[in-house]
């Protein structure tokens, strides 16, 4: 199962060279990252796993909660991360 998820994330990374962007219900950008999808996901996950950095974590959680759509078929990685953000990620 984990291998399947990793391969799907790798496919997303290859398909989104411009970065990872999500939008709110009004079509305004919420998450705007120059990083490919996989790198954005890994950095955001590392942030959630880190100690301290509560303002950055809360900002990320707010962005995840406000996101309802993604750019360029970028996949719904933000939804997976949002699920991890509410519970332990270690």
Image: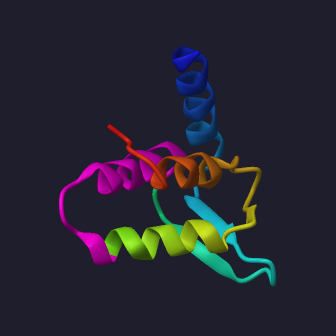
Figure check: 83 above or below 9: below
Q: Looking at this view, name the residue that lies furthest to the left.
A: 51
Image-based side of 38 in relation to 44, left or right: right
Observer-nearest of 3 and 61:
61
Asked whether 39 falls inside the magenta stretch, the response is yes
Image-based side of 40 in relation to 67, left or right: left
Quadrant occupied by the N terminus: top right
Residue at image location 57% in from the left, 65% down from the top: 64
Residue 21 percent across, percent down from the top left? 62, 65
Image-based side of 26 in relation to 13, left or right: right
Asked whether 2 falls inside the magenta stretch, the response is no
Residue 49 percent across, percent down from the top left? 29, 49
Residue at image location 31% in from the left, 78% down from the top: 55
Figure check: 76 above or below 23: above
Colour setup of the view = rainbow
Per the picture, the main secondary structure of the magenta-coloured stretch is: helix
Residue at image location 71% in from the left, 73% down from the top: 23
Observer-nearest of 19 and 4:
4
Quadrant of the image occupied by residue 14: top right
Highlighted range, magenta: 36-55
Residue 85 percent across, percent down from the top left? 47, 54
Residue 31 percent across, percent down from the top left? 56, 71
Figure check: 61 above or below 86: below
């Amino acid at each position: 199962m984990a291998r399947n998820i990793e391969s799907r994330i790798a496919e997303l990374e290859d398909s989104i060279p411009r970065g990872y962007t999500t939008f709110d219900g009004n079509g305004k950008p919420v998450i705007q990252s120059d990083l490919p999808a996989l790198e954005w996901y890994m950095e955001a996950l590392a942030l959630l796993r880190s100690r301290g950095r509560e303002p950055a974590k809360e900002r990320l959680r707010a962005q995840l909660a406000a996101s309802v759509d993604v750019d360029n078929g970028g996949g719904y990685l933000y939804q997976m991360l949002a699920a991890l953000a509410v519970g332990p990620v270690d």
